[in-house]
Amino acid sequence: MAAWGYHSELDAARIQAEQVHLAAREPEGVTYREVDAGGVPGIRCEPVDADTDHVLLHSHVGGSVPASAPVDRRLGGHIAKAAEAPVLVLDFRRALGTQVPGAGSSP
């Protein structure tokens, strides 16, 4: 794969995706903390006055190749603020970063 430039194109796409979130404003009144969600790392985005009876689940751009939880952190914060509820942004493996993704293997 590396001979075809695959990894360099993949790296470029991931770097570009990680730069996109820098253009978004940080939502006011939202706190973030890293959490363990049943063995899957995640980021909990919680507005100051959130109703914590429920938590919204956000899967970063759906099993994507370039995106990750840190990339979607601000988006999760904006969703949390608009919904007035905490949002959990899961940080699962990105496609093409794992040989054979599957249940029971480490994230």
Image: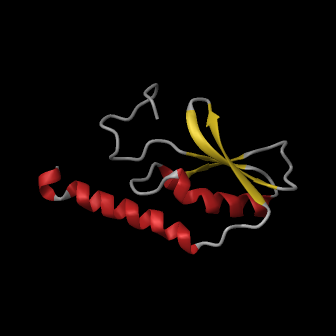
Q: Which residue lies furthest to the left in this view?
A: 3
Q: Position of residue 50 (x, y in %)?
A: 84, 53
14, above or below 38, in the image: below
Relative depth, front residue between 31 and 83: 31
Relative depth, front residue between 2 and 102: 2
70, above or below 15, in the image: above
Q: Position of residue 7 (x, y in %)?
A: 24, 54
89, above or below 104, in the image: below
Q: What's the colour scheme?
A: secondary structure
Total marks shown come to 0
Q: Where is residue 97 in the image (x, y as percent from the top left)?
A: 34, 44
Q: Residue at x 11, y 54 (%)?
A: 3
Q: Which residue is drawn at 86% across and 49% down?
A: 51
Q: Residue at x 44, y 64 (%)?
A: 17
Q: In this view, does 90 lie to the left or right of 1?
A: right
Q: Where is residue 94 in the image (x, y as percent from the top left)?
A: 42, 47
Q: Residue 54 lies in what quarter of the image?
A: top right
Q: Residue at x 32, y 64 (%)?
A: 12
Q: Which residue lies furthest to the top in this view?
A: 104
Q: Residue 34 lies in what quarter of the image?
A: top right
Q: Residue 41 lies in what quarter of the image?
A: top right
